[in-house]
Image (cartoon, rainbow, N blue to C red):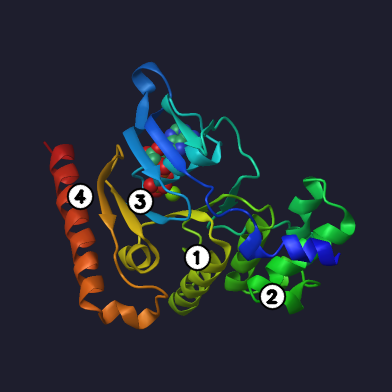
Amino acid sequence: MLDVLKYRRPEEAGSRGKGRIEIDDVSITFGRGAAAHRAVEPTTITIEPGQFVCILGPSGCGKSTLMNAVAGYTRPTTGQVRVDGAVIEKPGPDRGMVFQQYSLLPWKTVYENVAFGPKMAGHGKVEASSIANTFLNMVGLAKFGNRYPAELSGGMQQRVGIARALANYPSVLLMDEPFGALDAQTRLMMQESLLEIWRKFGTTVLFVTHDVDEAVFLADRVLIMSAAPGRIIEDLAIDLPRPRRPDIAVDPAYVAAKQHCLSSIRTESRRAFEEQNK
Ligand code: ADP
Ligand code: MG
């Protein structure tokens, strides 16, 4: 058991240096013929190992569709997604996923939810338990292992979701509007604690949001998507120091980055609106 803890410490998880995502000329069309609907225009982008990248764009622009192609739930119509060189064809434990709706198993305790992945991956009881406890501890829920998801607040459930995803030692963490259902105060706390976890774990994070503040606060890079059909219109570096605290929102560099995102989105939305009304 001690051995397990020795090599299973999150900061030694081996995810560092892994997690390069290559989205190579990916487009995604739903339906065929007259009913064909292109959700994602041809997109090429590379995300380096350990980067925290936000995809920012209006509702319906194709963020989840693009994310699902990285997760392996949706097959690209053209092009391919590679993670560390391997072409993505289906979901896998190298890519942990956290959604907006808490996708915990309601009939299992918090502990069992987190230990489930490691058990499925073939770890013995003792090892799975050690892994689960490590990650519950990391998200600050060590004392809540025996509770059921319904007995926890939304923010706590989402932290269990993060622990559960990390317990598979993914090289990539995919988060689709994970804090969208939380109240503003809880959301801020979750953003801070996610950054803290990311700093310890070092995994690549691809995070979808429609919230400009959330994107600028979290990201190394913000990929701005156009209104439907979605394509990445901008790849903006956020060169703000870390660790970031909420009071960074008054930093002139933060304000400038935020204004830049807002103006790109406004210009793009106006273009899309005029296009639709031509
Ligand atoms: P976002 O996450 O940015 O809000 P989505 O990726 O969910 O946007 O959706 C992009 C577009 O693709 C929308 O027009 C949506 O209706 C359409 N779409 C998403 N999933 C499917 C699907 N499985 N079948 C058909 N159309 C879909
Ligand atoms: Mg979505």
Q: Is residue 54 above or below residue 137?
A: above
Residue positioned 36% across, 69% down in the render: 217
Q: Does the beta carbon of the residue at mark 2 sit less than 8 Å from ligand 2?
A: no
Q: Does the beta carbon of the residue at mark 1 sit less than 8 Å from ligand 2?
A: no
Q: Which residue is mark 2?
A: 141
Q: Amino acid at mark 2?
A: Leu
Viewer-nearest residue: 175 or 34:
175
Query: Residue 208 in the image: x percent, y percent?
Result: 42, 54
Decide if residue 109 is in sight here.
Answer: no
Q: Extreme right residue here? A: 125
Q: Which residue is mark 4?
A: 269
For discs 2 and 4, the disc positioned in front in the rendered view: 2
Query: Residue 177 in the image: x percent, y percent?
Result: 46, 57
Q: Amino acid at mark 3?
A: Ser
Residue positioned 19% across, 43% down in the render: 272
Q: Which residue is mark 3?
A: 59
Q: Residues within 10 Å of mark 2 (few under 14, many from 20)?
A: some
